[in-house]
Image (cartoon, rainbow, N blue to C red):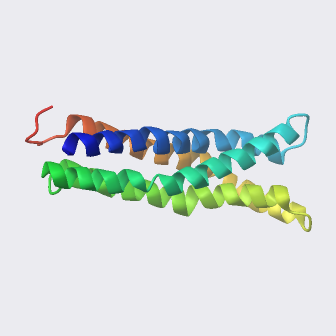
Amino acid sequence: MAKFLLSLHLLAVALCIGPVAVAVSMFPRRAKAALAGGPEQAGAQTSVRLLHRISNVYALIGLAVPVLGIGTAQVMHVLGNAWLVTSIVLTAIAAGVLLLFVLPGQQATVDALDATEDKDAETARAAGKLKLLPMTAGVFNLLWAVVLVLMVIRPGSSNGA
Protein backbone atom coordinates (compact mmCIF):
# COMPACT_ATOMS: atom_id res chain seq x y z
CA MET A 1 0.00 0.00 0.00
CA ALA A 2 2.85 2.39 0.84
CA LYS A 3 4.39 2.03 -2.62
CA PHE A 4 1.04 2.65 -4.28
CA LEU A 5 0.36 5.78 -2.20
CA LEU A 6 3.90 7.02 -2.74
CA SER A 7 3.51 6.54 -6.48
CA LEU A 8 0.24 8.50 -6.47
CA HIS A 9 1.86 11.22 -4.34
CA LEU A 10 4.81 11.57 -6.72
CA LEU A 11 2.51 11.56 -9.74
CA ALA A 12 0.42 14.32 -8.16
CA VAL A 13 3.58 16.34 -7.46
CA ALA A 14 4.73 16.06 -11.07
CA LEU A 15 1.35 16.73 -12.64
CA CYS A 16 0.05 19.39 -10.22
CA ILE A 17 2.94 21.30 -8.71
CA GLY A 18 5.05 21.34 -11.88
CA PRO A 19 2.52 23.29 -13.98
CA VAL A 20 1.88 25.78 -11.16
CA ALA A 21 5.60 26.36 -10.70
CA VAL A 22 6.09 27.00 -14.42
CA ALA A 23 3.01 29.21 -14.80
CA VAL A 24 3.90 31.27 -11.72
CA SER A 25 7.43 31.77 -13.05
CA MET A 26 6.33 32.78 -16.55
CA PHE A 27 3.53 35.11 -15.47
CA PRO A 28 5.45 38.28 -14.44
CA ARG A 29 7.30 38.66 -17.72
CA ARG A 30 4.20 38.10 -19.81
CA ALA A 31 2.19 40.43 -17.55
CA LYS A 32 4.64 43.29 -18.13
CA ALA A 33 4.28 42.82 -21.87
CA ALA A 34 0.49 42.59 -21.57
CA LEU A 35 0.23 45.86 -19.62
CA ALA A 36 2.65 47.69 -21.90
CA GLY A 37 1.83 48.81 -25.41
CA GLY A 38 3.40 47.33 -28.48
CA PRO A 39 3.06 44.54 -30.97
CA GLU A 40 3.37 41.78 -28.35
CA GLN A 41 0.51 43.10 -26.23
CA ALA A 42 -2.35 41.02 -27.66
CA GLY A 43 -0.43 37.74 -27.48
CA ALA A 44 0.85 38.56 -24.02
CA GLN A 45 -2.69 39.28 -22.79
CA THR A 46 -3.81 35.86 -23.98
CA SER A 47 -0.80 34.26 -22.29
CA VAL A 48 -1.49 36.10 -19.02
CA ARG A 49 -5.07 34.86 -18.89
CA LEU A 50 -3.97 31.30 -19.66
CA LEU A 51 -1.15 31.33 -17.09
CA HIS A 52 -3.52 32.69 -14.44
CA ARG A 53 -6.06 29.99 -15.21
CA ILE A 54 -3.36 27.30 -15.02
CA SER A 55 -2.18 28.69 -11.68
CA ASN A 56 -5.72 28.68 -10.25
CA VAL A 57 -6.80 25.28 -11.53
CA TYR A 58 -3.60 23.44 -10.69
CA ALA A 59 -3.39 25.10 -7.27
CA LEU A 60 -6.79 23.59 -6.49
CA ILE A 61 -5.90 20.18 -7.94
CA GLY A 62 -2.57 20.41 -6.11
CA LEU A 63 -4.38 19.88 -2.81
CA ALA A 64 -4.04 16.19 -3.66
CA VAL A 65 -0.28 16.44 -3.05
CA PRO A 66 -0.34 17.03 0.73
CA VAL A 67 -3.36 14.77 1.18
CA LEU A 68 -1.59 11.87 -0.53
CA GLY A 69 1.66 12.78 1.20
CA ILE A 70 0.12 12.63 4.67
CA GLY A 71 -1.62 9.36 3.78
CA THR A 72 1.67 7.92 2.58
CA ALA A 73 3.46 9.10 5.74
CA GLN A 74 0.84 7.43 7.94
CA VAL A 75 1.19 4.13 6.12
CA MET A 76 5.00 4.37 6.33
CA HIS A 77 4.82 5.34 10.05
CA VAL A 78 6.98 8.46 9.57
CA LEU A 79 4.37 11.14 10.27
CA GLY A 80 6.16 12.42 13.38
CA ASN A 81 9.64 12.60 11.86
CA ALA A 82 11.25 16.05 11.90
CA TRP A 83 12.04 16.04 8.18
CA LEU A 84 8.41 15.33 7.34
CA VAL A 85 7.00 17.87 9.78
CA THR A 86 9.39 20.45 8.30
CA SER A 87 8.22 19.51 4.81
CA ILE A 88 4.58 19.88 5.83
CA VAL A 89 5.26 23.31 7.32
CA LEU A 90 7.14 24.42 4.19
CA THR A 91 4.32 23.11 2.01
CA ALA A 92 1.82 25.13 4.05
CA ILE A 93 4.01 28.24 3.69
CA ALA A 94 4.25 27.66 -0.08
CA ALA A 95 0.46 27.38 -0.25
CA GLY A 96 0.18 30.59 1.74
CA VAL A 97 2.55 32.43 -0.61
CA LEU A 98 0.53 31.20 -3.57
CA LEU A 99 -2.86 32.08 -2.09
CA LEU A 100 -1.96 35.38 -0.41
CA PHE A 101 0.52 36.91 -2.84
CA VAL A 102 0.86 35.17 -6.21
CA LEU A 103 -2.76 34.52 -7.18
CA PRO A 104 -4.02 37.96 -6.02
CA GLY A 105 -1.18 39.61 -7.95
CA GLN A 106 -2.10 37.65 -11.03
CA GLN A 107 -5.76 38.49 -10.56
CA ALA A 108 -4.95 42.21 -10.33
CA THR A 109 -3.21 41.98 -13.70
CA VAL A 110 -6.14 40.14 -15.29
CA ASP A 111 -8.55 42.68 -13.79
CA ALA A 112 -6.48 45.51 -15.27
CA LEU A 113 -6.62 43.86 -18.68
CA ASP A 114 -10.40 43.43 -18.40
CA ALA A 115 -11.09 46.93 -17.04
CA THR A 116 -13.22 49.17 -19.21
CA GLU A 117 -13.71 52.01 -16.73
CA ASP A 118 -10.81 53.68 -14.92
CA LYS A 119 -8.32 51.53 -16.79
CA ASP A 120 -5.38 53.71 -15.68
CA ALA A 121 -6.14 53.12 -11.99
CA GLU A 122 -6.44 49.36 -12.51
CA THR A 123 -3.21 49.28 -14.50
CA ALA A 124 -1.39 51.24 -11.78
CA ARG A 125 -2.73 48.85 -9.11
CA ALA A 126 -1.66 45.85 -11.16
CA ALA A 127 1.78 47.34 -11.79
CA GLY A 128 2.26 47.77 -8.05
CA LYS A 129 1.44 44.13 -7.37
CA LEU A 130 3.44 43.03 -10.39
CA LYS A 131 6.63 44.35 -8.78
CA LEU A 132 6.37 41.66 -6.09
CA LEU A 133 5.36 38.78 -8.35
CA PRO A 134 8.85 37.72 -9.50
CA MET A 135 10.03 37.58 -5.89
CA THR A 136 6.97 35.73 -4.61
CA ALA A 137 7.15 33.31 -7.53
CA GLY A 138 10.78 32.65 -6.65
CA VAL A 139 9.94 32.09 -2.98
CA PHE A 140 7.11 29.72 -3.94
CA ASN A 141 9.41 27.68 -6.20
CA LEU A 142 12.29 27.73 -3.69
CA LEU A 143 10.02 26.38 -0.96
CA TRP A 144 8.99 23.50 -3.21
CA ALA A 145 12.64 22.82 -4.08
CA VAL A 146 13.51 22.59 -0.36
CA VAL A 147 10.56 20.25 0.23
CA LEU A 148 11.76 18.07 -2.64
CA VAL A 149 15.27 17.89 -1.19
CA LEU A 150 13.87 17.00 2.24
CA MET A 151 11.75 14.25 0.67
CA VAL A 152 14.77 12.79 -1.09
CA ILE A 153 17.39 12.94 1.68
CA ARG A 154 14.99 12.41 4.62
CA PRO A 155 17.41 13.47 7.38
CA GLY A 156 17.03 11.29 10.45
CA SER A 157 14.75 8.90 8.61
CA SER A 158 14.85 5.29 9.75
CA ASN A 159 14.00 4.22 6.19
CA GLY A 160 17.52 4.86 4.86
CA ALA A 161 18.50 7.06 1.95
Above or below for 104 versus 155 = below
Q: Residue at x 91, y 64 (%)?
A: 116
State left or right for residue 59 relative to residue 107.
left
Query: With 157 as the anchor, is 4 left or right in this view?
Result: right
Query: Can you give x and y, in whole percent of width and height, for residue 143 in the image?
Result: 40, 46
Direction left: furthest residue = 158
In which image quadrant can residue 12 be found? Answer: top left
What quarter of the picture does the N terminus occupy?
top left
Left or right: 151 as drawn, with respect to 109: left
Q: Nearer the viewer, residue 111 or 78?
A: 78
Is residue 90 visible to the viewer in this orientation of the structure? no
- Name the residue at 59% across, 50% down: 55
Across and down, in percent, residue 58 comes to 54, 50
x then y, percent, for residue 129? 67, 57
Quadrant hosting residue 19: top right
- Which residue is at the far top? 161
Q: Quadrant of the C terminus?
A: top left
Residue 10 appears left or right of 158: right
- The number of numbered discs placed on residues in the rendered structure image is 0
The image quadrant that residue 122 belongs to is: bottom right
Where does residue 95 sit, x and y in percent of width and height?
45, 57
Give the answer, above or below, for where 59 lies relative to 34.
below
In this view, the residue in front, 33 or 23, is 23
Q: Residue at left 92%, top 68%?
A: 117
Which residue is at 69% across, 59% downward?
107
Q: Is residue 19 visible?
A: yes
